[in-house]
Image (cartoon, grey):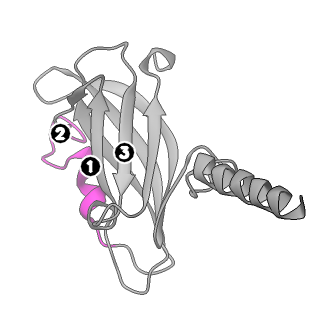
Amino acid sequence: MKKLTAIILTAIMIFSFAACDGAGKDEDPNLIKIGDYQAVYKGSEIVKDSDGNDALVATYDYTNNSKEAQSFEWSMYYTVTQGDAELEYTTIFVSEDSYDTLDESTRQDVAPGESLEVKMTYKLNDLTTPVEIKFSDLFESEKDSLTIDLTSLK
């Protein structure tokens, strides 16, 4: 009987960790953690891109906890989908008289132990279907995700 109880308790613990995805989602649903890197989701907004299309700007505080300088774009691999369709990257300029784009910070190297605000920019297919951003490491051994409800941004 003790052996059966131990097996059942072990199974419960394993399923509990699997439900959390091991990524600390129980602590902070806005925290994305992939290996030595983390990004805290700060919010999103819907704006017009350089072609006049509706676009999503998602903002994160990216922290590099590794031993070498690394950019958000190279430390976390991500796909952005809306429904069953992968969203296209889009260009959003900082201002009308500038060629600087909002997402340039994703390519900027961040020193170990430092943080940087980064913005991801994607063209939307519609303004109601939620957007899901799936993050992983290079080998997809660590995964995390975030869903953005567009209807709450209006």
Q: Which residue is mark 2?
A: 89
Magenta range = 89-109
Q: CA distance from mark 2 to mark 1?
A: 10 Å
Residue 151 counted in the magenta span: no
Report the residue that reaches farthest toward the right.
Answer: 2
Tell me the element at label 2: loop
Task: Find residue 141 and report its horizontal and vertical position in percent.
Answer: 38, 64
Residue occupying the point 52% across, 43% down: 42
Sequence-first disc among 3 and 1: 1
Place residue 70 in its image quadrant: bottom left
Q: Which residue is mark 1?
A: 103
Q: Are marks 3 and 2 in contact (CB under 8 Å)?
A: no
Depth order, front residue of 123/98: 123
Task: Find residue 13 and report its horizontal and vertical position in percent.
Answer: 72, 56
Q: Amino acid at mark 3?
A: Lys
Q: Residues within 10 Å of mark 1 (few under 14, many from 20)?
A: many
Tell me the element at label 3: strand
Rendered image: mark on residue 134: 3
Q: Are marks 2 and 1 in contact (CB under 8 Å)?
A: yes
Sequence-first disc among 3 and 2: 2
Residue occupying the point 27% across, 14% down: 126
